[in-house]
Amino acid sequence: MQTTRVILLRHGECKGGNILRGQIDVALTEQGELQMQSVLRGLECSSFVPNFVLSSPLIRCANIAEEFALTQGLSYSTNAAFKELDFGDWDGQTFDALYQSHAEELDAYWANPWAVAPPNGESMQAFESRIDKAWQVMLEAYKGQCVLLVTHGGVMRHLIAKALGVTQAVGFYSSLKLPYAAKAEIDVLYDENGQQFLTLHWGERRT
């Protein structure tokens, strides 16, 4: 049997304040940089050093991911399919402003994002589909290796749900709290028939 290990890492704290941050391209704050550096230093000392670094192209992920890859001498690339969900007209607006003008629509979206899409934005079905496709391409390209994927909270929530076998569970995304620079690991085990079995690891692993 062969195992592919994927280390999921959310970006750190971002500039822009309390906004709905989808595909708007904003940099990390100084605190966000420190958060990421702390986690990545831990990776350098672990027994699970990645063979490859893959990142969302948005700068809150890509800048620190590329810097880490360069310092570690690792191959690096970006994949737009691992961007955060596109919130359309809501993207980049403050939550206060959004609730003043779109409270009813926002409440309906948070209650069931599979039934309601942001105006001129991406449906949850389309979001999950693009991640699933990119996930399979990544697994085929790096089968049996360890990949660091620097990405976003929404992407991580979907992949964690996938590992747990959860589909379209209303409230799952909102109840799964992922702080800035959160890290999780998914092992993908292949049996002799090529079938995949996913195992989620949360927290530090010693072996």
Image: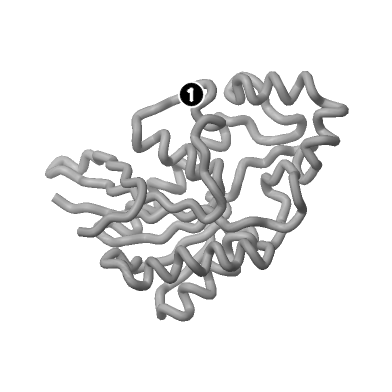
Going by the image, does 41 lie left or right of 194? Answer: right
The image quadrant of residue 53 is bottom left
Q: Nearer the viewer, residue 91 or 202?
A: 202
Residue 194 lies left or right of residue 8; in this view the side is: left
Q: Label 1: few (<14), some or many (≥20) within 10 Å? A: some
- Residue 140 image point, x, y percent: 33, 53
The quadrant the C terminus occupies is bottom left
Number of on-image labels: 1
Q: Position of residue 127 (x, y in %)?
A: 56, 37
Residue drawn where x is 57% and y is 54% of the image = 80
**Way the structure is coloured:** one colour
| Above or below, comparing residue 76 to residue 89 in the picture | below
Horizontal placement of 167 versus 94: left or right?
Answer: left
Q: Amino acid at mark 1?
A: Gln
Identify the residue at horizontal 22%, vertical 52% (top origin).
Answer: 3
Secondary structure at badge 1 equals loop
> x%, y% of residue 65?
52, 67
Q: Measuring from the top left, give residue 77's x and y in whole percent.
A: 50, 66
Disc 1 target residue: 168
Q: Residue at x 20, y 45 (%)?
A: 190
